[in-house]
Amino acid sequence: MAKYLLLKHYRGAKEIPCAPMDQWTPEEVEAHLAFMGHVANTFRERGEFVDAQALSPEGTFVRHDGAGKPPVTDGPFAETKDLIAGWMVIDVDSVERAHEAAAFLSSAPGPGGEPINEWIEVRPFLEHTHTDVE
Amino acid sequence: MDAVVRDLTPQVLGVLVRRGADFAAAEDAVQEALVEAVRRWPDDPPDDPKPWLITVAWRKFIDANRRESARRTREVRLHDEPEPGPAEEHDDTLQLLFLCCHPALTPASAVALTLRAVGGLTTAQIAEAYLVPEPTMGQRISRAKRTIADAGVGAPGDLSRVLKVLYLIFNEGYSGDVDLAAEAIRLTRMLRGASDEPEVAGLLALMLLHHARRTARWTEDGALVPLAEQDRSRWDTALITEGVDILQDALAKDRLGEYQCQAAIAALHCDARSTEETDWTQVLEWYDELARLTDSPVVALNRAVAVGEADGPLAGLRALETVPADVPRRVAVEAWLRERVGDTVVAADLYVQAATAARSTAERDHLTKQAARLRHAPG
């Protein structure tokens, strides 16, 4: 088994071929969110689900500024090019299954109930432990 | 009582399954019997716990079956089943192990089910070991049971599949308080007690010889220590002796297999006081044997390392040419061979490239440090 992060970019390196969600009807938004829940439940039922989280679109940059000084903050930046909307983490048998799962997530309905086919970034986790055969 | 229960649970489960109970129902019945044991044994301990558990679990199973009228036909068949003779008893756990490695299951499902049903670990412990939420592991295990029930118990896994599953469990190592390597060794010992197949002994020897070096393989903060730099005084000599003895018994049967070859290579490493003193010519001969038994590109890659040690890095690089480019760790091996040739600039670049493709943090950190070492080497 290997864990994969399925990363949802709200906007980023890959263009999403549909209108932003604030222009959808409430029913379309609802159907979309219900589908997300359905995807998570499907992974749960298959024994593959690890985690799913949504992120607030705005964040703050923070850094250390020397001992005894308060942290320096910067932002929020409204115009960031990339925006991560959320993620799912799955634990699956193969990279092929990870891709299949990502494609399923990508098929969430958008305006008119049509699949959005948004790009999902699939990133393998680095393992923490393993016995190495020399 | 815990240790007794942990040993007996798979045996009792095995008896029920052999008598024709389906997997999930058998497990429920055994759990109910255990609950009853916890309630009654403190005041009224049985003379022999195993027949007690079998009798109670079987009764629980029959009761549950009766309640399900839809299963009436199966119930009739079950009542016709003869009582097992004493000679069959020791095979029950073994049969359960083969069932858990059913060909209809993916490796991950077989691993989870084996740990639950044969290993007697709780779902929470298995979930912790594999770093997934407990309900996820619970689902994985119940799906595996359903898959077996649907596929029918007629075609249990073959021995090579069982060995593969045990090997996968061993390779997972340990995280949290669950030591899966130790668990794999325990299960493989059990299997060896019931099977004379030399490959079973070969796998057990391989595990012991690797396990013996475990503490030397990692620093206290989790960094990887390559074989050449390991403190060999920290190797567990008792485990090495046991592993070598088991391997020699296996090899004497003259039916060579992959695990015996790998164990033989591990034994040669364990036998040397340093990499310089390692009998690389013999290591290479074993890799040649292994390559004849399997066309695995990983074996071809490891063989190239042995060639590099036995016949020099240029010969190693030539051996590497036949290894496909997409084999994991191929770039790391090439970096190591290039460094030995004296091509440090190319080697450093290759180490960086290998670090990018590493599959674990320990491996990535180790390779990054190799690149850093070469780039900051004097001269």
Image: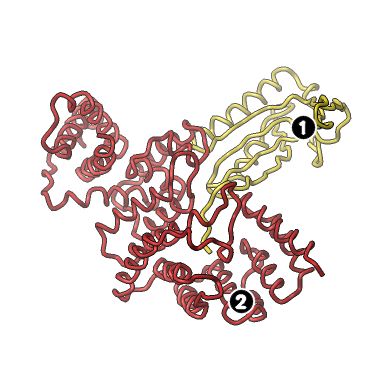
Chain colours: A yellow, B red
**Where is the C terminus of chain B found, in terms of image quarters?**
bottom right
Q: Quick one: SS at disc 1?
A: strand
Q: Residue at x 18, y 28 (%)?
A: B41
What's the residue at 63%, 62% (across, down)? B329
Tally the marks. Answer: 2
Circle 1/circle 2 CB separation < 8 Å: no
What residue is pinned by disc 1?
A: A10
Q: Which residue is denoted by mark 2 in the rendering?
A: B308
State left or right for residue B143 relative to residue B95.
right
Quadrant containing the N terminus of chain B in the rendered view: top left
Considering only vertical position in the picture, is B269 above or below A84? below
**Along the line of sight, the residue nearer the viewer: B278 or A24:** B278
| Neighbours of disc 1 within 10 Å: few (<14), some (14-19), many (20+) | some
Position of B318 with respect to B55 (left or right) is right
Residues at discs 1 and 2 both on one chain: no
Counting from the top left corner in percent of width and height, residue B344 is at 76, 70
The chain ID associated with circle 1 is A
Q: Position of residue B305 (x, y in %)?
A: 59, 72
In the image, what residue type sits under mark 1? Tyr
Instruction: Tell me where residue A52 appears, x and y as whole percent.
Output: 62, 30
Specify the amino acid type for callout 2: Gly
- Label 2 crowd bin: few (<14), some (14–19), many (20+), radius 10 Å: many
Looking at the rendering, which quadrant does residue B257 occupy? bottom left
Give the quarter of the image for residue B37: top left
State how far apart marks 1 and 2 are (Cα): 50 Å
Q: Subunit of mark 2?
A: B
Disc 2 on helix, strand or loop? helix
